[in-house]
Image (cartoon, grey):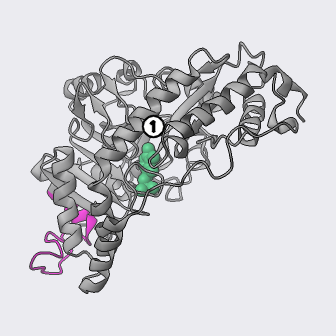
Amino acid sequence: MEKLAIFGGQQTVPEGLIKSWPPIDDTDRKMVMASLEGGKHAFGPNCVAFQKEFADWNGNQFAINTNSGTAALHMGIAACGCGAGDEVIVTSYSWSSSATCILHHNCIPVFVDIKFETMNIDEDKIEAAVTPKTKAIVAVHLHGLPVNMDKVMAIAKRHKLKVIEDACQAHGALFQGRKVGTWGDCAAFSFNQNKCLCTGEGGMFVSNDETIYNNAKQLWSFGETRTPAEDRDYHAYALGWMYRCNDLTAAFGRAQLAKMDGYHDTLAANVKKMNECLAGTPHLILPENYPGAEGNGYNYTMRFDMEALGHADDPREFRDKIVRALKAEGVQTSVWQNFILPAMTVFQAKNGYGKGCPWDCSHAQPVDYDLSQYPMAQKHTDSHTGMTQPLRAPNGLDSVEATAAGIRKVMEQADKLNDLE
Ligand SMILES: *Cc1c(COP(=O)(O)O)cnc(C)c1O
């Protein structure tokens, strides 16, 4: 067997092979320069056009261009009528703001464990978390794999709940052939650097419900009812934030959106190839679509079979050794989240707004963040690693093959990593 790079052997993935995301060409340069020369730098004509183009691309009636995905999530919580002391159900494993967006509006997150196979909220455990205080469900399509929206929408209907889709990682992902962001009452997309549509920072709120759209719009821009593209009366009708995007960013977004379907095809082909190359690799659990789901490949997340590796008792430590060995081979992989959401200090210390709010609010009832409630989320957290860059455009099958070879090399001699300090 070839000596592992971490023990002085040769690195598998050549330096410089993996190109950075996103690809930039003359379309981006032209659009951004035209905005720069256009003189309208705040919420300008590119923002208005980007909203329309994104709504058309995703199949939504309404879209609002924001300065982040988190802003769009907060707008969704508020627009769905969630208020002080209300409970909102969310997965126990995601990016922090899938849950802090709930706190932002004085509401209380209630966490549900994940299904290990899908990495998403366990749809079959949602109903047990519903209480008379529950107002909504945040459905996070993690790593671009859609939540089973049939099940979620049925639960929501039974209990008269609203559904906010966190599609921040899921641009173009399909459930039963239909795009995410069109299933719930509204949805949030992120255009942060690492997302499948990158504008640096940015986001989009989408909905097909006019009332929810109008509510969201009010929170988005100072509590006003008219957008900067209309004849404003500069009156705060309700509590508002300043979540608008700017014209330069929107110009970049429009240029990237025009190339999105091409990026999507590249990623899909790379994921398919990665699955083929890694099939049968020892102790490796590959990401999979469950029936009806078509993920967008946002983050190719693998888990290691810690029981089979003999590390059921110290999964995190051994996972970190495997990741170090992978990185030494030039595999661009990382541990995405090292904490499950309820383990984060903001929830354990309940330090949100201070003085116990919103948990001690007179409208609230007690909730419990005992970590023993989320065993699958913890198991996933302790045994995963994920990759984005090597599978994204402009990288192609050669990047995938080299990366897969590095992973196989490490996993075929994983027992040797027991010797690592
Ligand atoms: C990135 C991300 C967000 C937040 O998006 P920002 O644009 O960074 O605010 C929310 N949820 C998930 C699942 C994300 O990956």
108 versus 2 height, above or below: below
Q: Dot 1: few (<14), some (14–19), or many (≥20) neighbours within 10 Å?
A: many
Foreground residue among 371 and 206: 206
Q: Position of residue 209 (x, y in %)?
A: 12, 47
Q: Quadrant of residue 408?
A: top right
Foreground residue among 404 and 309: 404
Q: Secondary structure at mark 1?
A: helix
Distance from mark 1 CB to nearest ligand 1 atom below 8 Å: no
Q: Position of residue 217 (x, y in %)?
A: 20, 62
Residue 383 belongs to magenta span = no
The region drawn magenta spans 214-237
- Residue ID at (61%, 39%): 343
Q: Which residue is mark 1?
A: 143
119 versus 9 height, above or below: above
- Residue ID at (37%, 36%): 296
Q: Position of residue 113 (x, y in %)?
A: 49, 26
